[in-house]
Image (cartoon, rainbow, N blue to C red):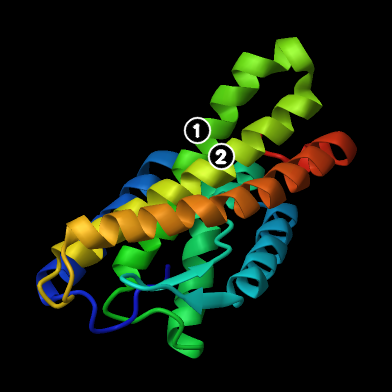
Amino acid sequence: MHIPDGYLDFTVSAATYALAGFYYLAGFKLKKMSMGPGEVSEATALAALIFVAQMLSWPIPGGTSLHFVGGALAGILTGPFKGSIVMAIVLLVQALVFHDGGITALGANIINMAVVDVWVGYITYKSILRVLSGRVGVDKASFVGGFLGGWLGLTVAGIVCGVEIGLSPAFPYGVFITVPVMGGWHAVLGVVEGLVTGLVVYYLKLRHPEVVAS
């Protein structure tokens, strides 16, 4: 899902940078966020884990690449805004140091993986938790919420990515090709991402509930 340089024209690139910048500026202003040493350590460890997991990727036709993202997991464990920061750090290091994702497309990649995936995954998880906790218990509800959050977060992020590259005149295919390809492939990968997310959240909720955001 890391969009490389050359896929987005200047207008789309500038618009996504502006949206990403506005999101973080507004978030810092509204949240007035501060993190203690323990939270910083947890966020750093999570960023390292996601960074390593994202290095395993492969190209797909009509889009960019397919890989584990971890946005939903970051949102569920640390909360959506802190999760967005964790993901943005991962994406920034990947772009600047490893050239995984273009500099001109960094705004779009942040929106897709650090905003859309994080928030969709987090909201889905919390919604499932509220509905199922009283029926099947918190632990099982956490697995179902984590699975659906991981799956839906990645799928929606893939669709948004397809819209971005499909609307860009720099890319040879339009949205009628890019959206189904990106959305469809990521919906398939989302099953794996959902299982990993659900199992991790289930284990942590069972053994270390203090590390899962309330």
Report the amino acid beneath label 1: Ile
Callout 2 environment at 10 Å: few (<14), some (14 to 19), or many (20+)?
Answer: many
Quadrant in the picture for residue 103: bottom left
Q: Position of residue 1 (x, y in %)?
A: 42, 67
Q: Nearer the viewer, residue 112 or 33?
A: 112
Q: Are marks 1 and 2 in contact (CB under 8 Å)?
A: yes
Task: Tell me: 70 left or right of 160.
Answer: right
Residue 149 drawn above or below residue 160: above
Q: Position of residue 60 (x, y in %)?
A: 42, 73
Residue 78 drawn above or below residue 158: above
> Which secondary structure, mark 2?
helix
Task: Tell me: 93 left or right of 41.
Answer: left
Residue under label 2: 149
Residue 2 drawn above or below residue 31: below
Q: Nearer the viewer, residue 45 or 69?
A: 69
Looking at the image, which residue sits at the far right? 207
Quarter the C terminus occupies: top right
User: Which residue: 38% across, 40% down?
Assistant: 30
Of the numbered discs 1 and 2, the one sitting upstream in the chain is: 1
Task: Tell me: 90 left or right of 65.
Answer: right
How far apart are labels 1 and 2 at the CA level? 8 Å
User: Which residue: 63% across, 65% down?
Assistant: 50
> Which secondary structure, mark 1?
helix
Q: Where is residue 181 in the image (x, y as percent from the top left)?
A: 34, 60
Residue under label 1: 123
Report the amino acid beneath label 2: Gly
